[in-house]
């Protein structure tokens, strides 16, 4: 019996991610490190507000390299004139210790920004070992496609799934994917041809459809997530979605 009904989702898309993956180190670029340093200053050291900093005050320097590169220069804009070299050096030393050698920042100098005339601490990312880490697989689908995928998994043996968000038991999911791959004809019942809907006195809505190749790709990514969990001995055995 098909219990799964179409429902209005609260968000525009549905993400699938490994439970506990937020605690696993991943590759970081200059932009990621700026965010991580901001989080460290505000939540670990708890001095962001005292120094008059905002989250927008730590940015990658894009004058010489892309913000998506692993090393290079970042800037800390010091709107508070009392922040001197010693304070910044102390923050950088503590951050380096916090990252345990995976990332090493080096204080260069404080000078004025050529754009805003604000004192700016220039920081060099001199070492970034996170670049050698594996990316954690995840998936983001439109509500329309997530609906169909969850419907398929439910009808093939997954426990009842909430339309807004929930979790997939990896042991059950693995068996379901194996079963589908042995008889992939079942996927065809969830595919749709592209179509166009004409609304009277309104715009035309185009639906891109959903192919069997798309479904195979969704199942492949789920298999990659399961394989990552097994390689890294993650104990939870859960893939979340929502």
Image: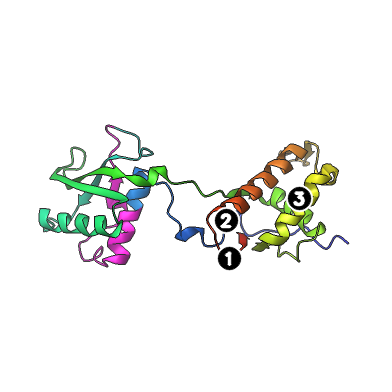
Residue 70: x %, y % from top left: 35, 40
Q: Residue at x 71, y 49 (%)?
A: 144
Q: Which residue is mark 1?
A: 236
Residue 145: x %, y % from top left: 71, 48
Q: Nearer the viewer, residue 47 or 45?
A: 45
Q: Residue at x 45, y 61 (%)?
A: 23
Using the numbered discs, state the Cα–Cα distance from disc 3 to disc 2 in whole angstroms.
17 Å
Q: Secondary structure at mark 2?
A: helix
Using the numbered discs, state the Cα–Cα distance from disc 2 to disc 1 in whole angstroms.
9 Å
Q: Residue at x 30, y 49 (%)?
A: 103
Q: Is residue 91 visible?
A: yes
Q: Secondary structure at mark 1?
A: loop
Which disc number belongs to residue 178? 3
* CB atoms of marks 2 and 1 within 8 Å: yes
Q: Is residue 165 visible?
A: no
Neighbour class for label 3 at 10 Å: few (<14), some, many (≥20)? few
Tell me if 78 is positioned left or right of 14 in this view. left
Which disc number belongs to residue 107? none
Toward the top, the furthest residue is 64
Q: Which residue is mark 2?
A: 229
Span of residues in magenta: 36-64
């Amino acid at each position: 019996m098909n219990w799964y009904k179409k429902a209005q989702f609260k968000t525009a898309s549905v993400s699938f991610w490994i439970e506990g993956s937020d605690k696993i180190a991943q590759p970081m670029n200059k932009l990621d490190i700026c965010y991580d340093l901001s989080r460290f200053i505000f939540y670990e050291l708890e001095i962001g507000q005292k120094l008059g900093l905002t989250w927008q005050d730590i940015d990658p320097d894009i004058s010489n390299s892309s913000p998506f590169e692993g090393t290079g220069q970042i800037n800390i804009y010091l709107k508070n004139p009392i922040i001197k070299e010693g304070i910044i050096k102390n923050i950088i030393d503590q951050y380096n210790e916090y990252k345990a050698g995976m990332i090493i920042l080096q204080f260069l100098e404080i000078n004025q920004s050529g754009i805003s005339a604000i004192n700016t601490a220039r920081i060099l990312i001199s070492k970034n070992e996170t670049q050698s880490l594996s990316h954690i697989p995840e998936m983001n689908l439109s509500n329309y496609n997530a609906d169909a995928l969850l419907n398929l998994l439910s009808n093939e043996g997954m426990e009842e799934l909430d339309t807004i968000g929930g979790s997939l038991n990896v042991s059950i999911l693995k068996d379901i994917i194996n079963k589908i791959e042995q008889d992939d004809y079942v996927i065809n019942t969830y595919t749709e041809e592209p179509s166009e809907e004409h609304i009277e006195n309104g715009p035309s809505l185009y639906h891109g459809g959903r192919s069997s190749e798309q479904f195979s790709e969704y199942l492949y990514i789920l298999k990659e997530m399961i394989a990552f969990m097994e390689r890294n001995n993650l104990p939870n055995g859960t893939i979340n979605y929502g």
